[in-house]
């Protein structure tokens, strides 16, 4: 099924003329280097029906952190030689690469713009949107992150002057300066609804300000969205860890693949992002699992990076209509086969394309895919590592994408909405909206039931953007068409600026639909419409039996599909958005009380407290009383306002339900009530209050506590001097924190030499050419790898296996198997040494099969018992081996 594929290696010095409608392109007259076939072709496995060619090497695109491909084929690469932990400014830029004659060879390149820490790029029309870190020219330190847009109207490959800022202050200034951009705000993508969606890492942001002055603060990670002109900024989902990008399908389903928190229980999660959903990181996903939307799968350790939803009918069916998710830590591009499950999905993950520390993936409107690889550039970037490759399906026929500005007749643009790939439809929509024309022709597509659902959805969202208020009545008629009801409801409620004229009836009627997807769209829409009179309709939604808190002392399940929870979860979010306090209090006397109680968990209102206490005093139902007591304990505290002066570190306290608690006006009222009930309770009943005290961290001494889990230390800052000699610190810390420590602790090479011996490194490694050759030779490691790369190779042996350091498996014709390192090799024989240091000499003529393994023989965790100081000394010793 797989084959090893080499790379095409040559440079183009020819001048090409452009066909009608193509972007002008003057090839470079300098030699252009491409990825080396020697370094890659022997270790990468690719599906047989794909063709790979090198597109750019580290001379042009070192340390490629992100990438975007225009519909017309230009590749924009975000070069970040600062990496995730570097702190020096003026080390980043956007490189524009062009294949003039579309033969797969990059012919022309320009430096499009200079920006530091580019983390997301979106290229559409003559605009290039970039998310990047800003620096203070006076101090030379990171200031914050901005979303900006560059224009290139003259098509010369260089931005036409300074960028326009769309959103400023999109991260955490303090920790950008102290740590770097490793948990900051990242990728950007555009949906067919016309919104730009932004992947927010768990630094969150404070007072992010958009183009019309709207300010938002978000504690932790999630998905943010904004219009292309920088207005209408709003939070889409919340409760994620360090996501790097989003993938968006033609029906506005959004998918993310996150990052593990290195032992804190949150691994890579493939998640279906549903508007207004809460995903729970870090305070809800363990002990308050019933309150979150669970991930579709937890696939273990790794580091999710760029993503793309592949929708292109020129690609083989088995690779089409799937979210493709890059994983830097696993060096693979994965895809997830999805099966619809009510309002969400179930999935099956599959390995697709192997690429060393892959960072991003995108496709042009002709169907050519591009991938970028970090390839060992380290945590602080490198000028010598990284590249871009192009991937095509076999029997690919290039079809040029036209310059849309040459389409004088709007009807031709409308026809492009019927194309079988998402890139073309989005580009055509963008040009139509720029012109503000074609609404009636687009409406004809929206009504046409003979067209594919992708086309009708694109037409509905395009029509809504073209017409605004004037198109409401026609969109309402589509809410009666079951095929597109979901999209019509979303389009009607999508823009808060035109929502006053939208009727509630289509949404209320949709609550009775047989489709959970339609119900979900209706519920989210009702929350956005802002009319409290619909609260009673929302309260009629049933709470499923799966809405159960974990038993005390347990957690989860928090990464398992639970489709039945989606609709009531969204209903609760809508009730909170509507501030439907009165309706929820009134529902306490009805059979709708369970959903009302769920919503009240997020309503810090005096009316809610008074209503709960009154309901408690009226009832004799012990179960209902218990639910009320728990709800009051849940709102005893609230989350402290987030000002970015602190951050919860890579392994935060997951106790919940809040991270940093603060009392509010009615905390004393709740405390007085709870203490009164505690005093009246019997000794057996007092155990309930001890559980409340522990679960909700009430800190009421009289109640006592029960053990749930030991809360982790809140470490907004790290005192390295205090902890650098603490044994076992390496095993307790994340790799990012270790890298930060190694930047500040020099280490003693003499001590490092002793540690090299004491850790038994010499068993597999030699440092002198006079010694017996065993495993990979360490005598010149300092000239091959920098400090960070040496540390990473020790901490994560499988993360990036350098050439010559890979493990070899050999099977002889006689059936014997050997696994180890090849320490000597001639034309006729070789010597392989296993992990125990035993050497075996083999005649090459006796070898039946020889292959390099994707994993290292060196196990992880060998240095877990070391302190930061000891690890720094070991690295310092190896760094001297040159």
Image: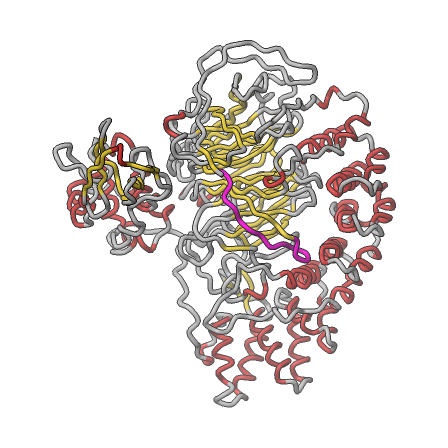
The residue nearer to you, when weighing 471 against 91, is: 471
Instruction: Give the percent coordinates (x, y) of residue 417.
Output: 75, 33
Instruction: Give the percent coordinates (x, y) of residue 485.
Output: 79, 50
Residue drawn at x 48%, y 89% as measured from the top left: 683
Asked whether, in this view, residue 524 is left or right of residue 839, the answer is right
Q: Which residue reaches farthest bottom?
A: 682
Is residue 821 placed above or below 270 in the rendered structure?
A: above
Instruction: Give the percent coordinates (x, y) of residue 332.
Output: 47, 41
Magenta span: predominant SS is: strand
The residue nearer to you, when weighing 618 against 459, is: 459
Is residue 877 placed above or below 114 in the rendered structure?
A: below
Instruction: Give the percent coordinates (x, y) of residue 878.
Output: 22, 38
Asked whether, in this view, residue 816 is left or right of residue 513, the answer is left
Q: Which residue reaches farthest front?
A: 814
Residue drawn at x 40%, y 30% as measured from the top left: 40
Q: What stretch is highlighted in magenta?
A: 340-353
| Snapshot quadrant of residue 39 | top left
């Amino acid at each position: 099924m797989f084959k090893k594929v080499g790379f095409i290696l040559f440079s183009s010095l020819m001048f090409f003329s452009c066909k009608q409608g193509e972007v002008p392109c003057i090839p470079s007259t300098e030699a252009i280097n491409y990825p080396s076939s020697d370094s890659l072709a022997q270790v990468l496995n690719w599906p047989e029906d794909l063709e790979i060619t090198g597109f750019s090497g580290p001379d042009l695109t070192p340390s490629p952190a992100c990438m975007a491909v225009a519909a017309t084929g230009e590749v924009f690469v975000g070069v970040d030689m600062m990496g995730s932990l570097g702190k020096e400014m003026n080390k980043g830029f956007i490189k524009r690469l062009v294949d003039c004659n579309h033969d797969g060879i990059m012919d022309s390149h320009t430096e499009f713009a200079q920006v530091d820490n580019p983390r997301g790029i979106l290229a559409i029309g003559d605009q290039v949107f970039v998310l990047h870190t800003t620096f203070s020219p006076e101090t030379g330190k990171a200031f914050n992150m901005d979303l900006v847009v560059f224009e290139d109207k003259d098509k010369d490959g260089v931005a036409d002057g300074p960028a326009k800022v769309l959103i400023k202050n999109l991260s955490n200034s303090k920790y950008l300066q102290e740590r770097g951009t490793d948990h900051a705000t990242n990728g950007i993508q555009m949906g067919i609804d016309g919104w730009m969606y932004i992947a927010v890492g768990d630094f969150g942001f404070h007072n992010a300000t958009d183009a019309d002055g709207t300010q938002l603060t978000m504690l932790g990670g999630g998905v943010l969205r904004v219009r292309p002109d920088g207005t209408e900024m709003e939070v889409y989902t919340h409760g994620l860890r360090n996501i790097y990008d989003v993938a968006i399908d033609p029906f506005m389903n959004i998918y993310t693949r996150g990052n593990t928190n290195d032992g804190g229980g949150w691994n890579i999660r493939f998640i279906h992002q549903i508007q207004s959903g809460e995903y729970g990181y870090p305070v809800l996903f363990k002990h308050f699992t019933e309150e979150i939307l669970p991930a579709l799968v937890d696939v273990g350790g790794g580091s999710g990076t760029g993503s793309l939803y592949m929708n292109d009918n020129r690609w083989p069916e088995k690779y089409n209509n799937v979210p493709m998710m890059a994983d830097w830590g696993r060096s693979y591009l994965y895809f997830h086969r999805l099966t619809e499950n009510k309002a969400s999905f179930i999935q099956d993950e599959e390995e697709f394309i192997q690429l060393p520390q892959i960072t991003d993936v995108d496709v042009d409107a002709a169907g050519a895919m591009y991938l970028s690889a970090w390839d060992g550039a380290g945590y602080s970037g490198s000028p010598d590592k990284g590249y871009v490759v192009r991937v095509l399906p076999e029997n690919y026929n290039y079809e040029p994408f036209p310059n849309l500005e040459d389409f004088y007749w709007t009807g031709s643009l409308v026809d492009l909405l019927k194309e079988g790939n998402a890139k073309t439809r989005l580009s055509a929509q963008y040009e139509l909206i720029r012109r503000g024309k074609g609404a009636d022709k687009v409406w004809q597509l929206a009504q046409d039931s003979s067209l594919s659902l992708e086309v009708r959805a694109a037409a509905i969202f395009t029509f809504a953007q073209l017409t605004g208020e004037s198109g409401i009545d026609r969109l309402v008629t589509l809410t009666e068409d079951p095929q597109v009801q979901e999209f019509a409801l979303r389009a009607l409620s999508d823009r808060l600026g035109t929502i006053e004229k939208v009727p509630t009836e289509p949404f209320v009627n949709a609550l009775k639909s047989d489709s959970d997807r339609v119900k979900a769209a209706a519920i989210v829409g009702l929350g956005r419409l802002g009319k409290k009179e619909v609260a009673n309709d929302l309260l009629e939604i049933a709470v499923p039996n799966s809405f159960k808190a974990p038993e005390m002392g347990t957690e989860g399940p928090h990464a398992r599909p639970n489709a039945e929870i989606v609709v009531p979860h969204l209903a609760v979010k809508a009730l909170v958005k509507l501030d439907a306090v009165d309706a929820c209090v009134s529902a306490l006397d009805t059979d709708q009380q369970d959903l009302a109680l769920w919503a009240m968990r997020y309503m810090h209102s005096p009316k809610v407290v008074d209503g709960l206490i009154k309901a408690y005093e009226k009832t004799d139902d012990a179960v209902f009383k218990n639910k009320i007591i728990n709800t009051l304990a849940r709102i005893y505290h609230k989350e402290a306002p987030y000002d970015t002066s602190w951050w919860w570190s890579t392994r935060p306290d997951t106790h919940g339900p809040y991270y940093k608690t603060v009392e509010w006006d009615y905390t004393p009222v709740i405390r007085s009530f709870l203490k009164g009930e505690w005093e009246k309770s019997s000794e057996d009943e007092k155990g309930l209050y001890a559980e409340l005290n522990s679960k909700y961290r009430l800190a009421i001494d009289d109640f006592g506590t029960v053990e749930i889990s030991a809360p982790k230390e809140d470490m907004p800052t790290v005192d390295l001097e205090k902890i650098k000699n603490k044994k076992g610190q390496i095993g307790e810390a994340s790799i990012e924190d270790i890298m930060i420590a190694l930047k500040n602790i020099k280490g003693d090479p003499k001590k490092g030499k002793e540690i090299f011996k004491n850790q038994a490194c010499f068993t597999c490694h030699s440092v002198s050419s006079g010694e017996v050759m065993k495993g990979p030779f360490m005598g010149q490691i300092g000239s091959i790898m920098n400090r960070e790369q040496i540390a990473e190779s020790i901490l994560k042996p499988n993360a990036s296996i350098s050439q010559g350091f890979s493990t070899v498996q050999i099977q002889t014709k006689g059936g014997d198997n050997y696994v180890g390192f090849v320490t000597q090799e001639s034309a006729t024989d070789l010597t392989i040494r296993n992990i125990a240091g035993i050497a075996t000499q083999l005649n090459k003529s006796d070898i039946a099969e020889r292959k390099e393994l994707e994993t290292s023989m060196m196990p992880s965790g060998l240095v877990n018992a070391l302190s930061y100081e000891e690890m720094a000394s070991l690295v310092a010793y190896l760094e001297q081996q040159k």
